[in-house]
Image (spheres, helix red, strand yellow):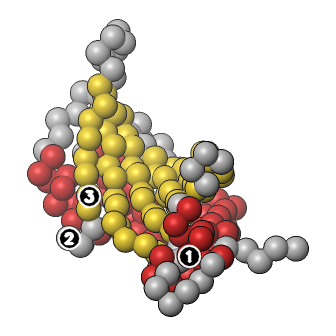
Amino acid sequence: MFDPTAFDNMKVIVEGALYDRDLSGEIIITDRNDIINMAKMSRQFNISFSIPQGKPKAVLGKMELESKLVHLSAELLPSSHTEQLVGCLVKLYFTFDIKEVEIDYYELNTILFGIWGTSRKITLSIQHEPLQPTKREKGIITVDFERLITEDQMDDLVGMTDVMITTQQKLSEYLNK
């Protein structure tokens, strides 16, 4: 038996919180990936979900945890100057289709900062498929905490799932108005 790393512990907490909500019917898990990159000695876990709804403009949420070699080595080979490197990076993604919707990106930005605050890096990008006959566009919102999340913040990870669901609901309301 091995001693789980901080990444493993945080991944289990996130999975448990989201699968509990899936079982209760609050969300629908749509994808899950647990990736080990042997070339870079890093790990990444991501889980995607949507909110069950009858509206056409669904917003997909994805939580991503990443642990790089520096984080693993700091945990397995501890010293007084590496303790601040134990943990993982967290990014959140929200994707939605844009079709025949006039979006005020400043208003969208105001909604996002109202939910997440101004201390997070929030980016919005539009993905356009020019060679497709339907001219599909997809909006991608990224919430980046730009810092390491540690095991001391496990409760925050569970709380983050609540805020992700709220974000999906608010974005869906905005897109379907």
Residue 118: give its label.
Answer: 2
- The image quadrant that residue 103 belongs to is top left
Near-viewer residue (38 or 135): 38
Query: Is 124 situated above or below 23?
Result: above
Q: Amino acid at mark 1?
A: Ala
Residue 74 tag number: 1
Secondary structure under tag 3 reads strand
First reached walking from the N terminus: tag 2 or tag 1: 1
Give 94 or 174, whichever is nearer the viewer: 94
Q: Residue at x 50, y 84 (%)?
A: 83
Q: Nearer the viewer, residue 140 or 167?
A: 140
Q: Earlier in the sequence, mark 3 or mark 1?
A: 1
Check whether the beta carbons of the residues at disc 3 and disc 2 lie within 8 A of each other.
Answer: no
Residue at the bottom extreme of this rendering: 80
In three-dimensional space, the C-alpha distance between marks 3 and 2, rounded to whole angstroms, equals 8 Å
Residue located 47% across and 43% down the image:
54
Residue labelled with disc 3:
122
Label 2 Cα crowd, 10 Å radius (few <14 / some 14-19 / many 20+): few
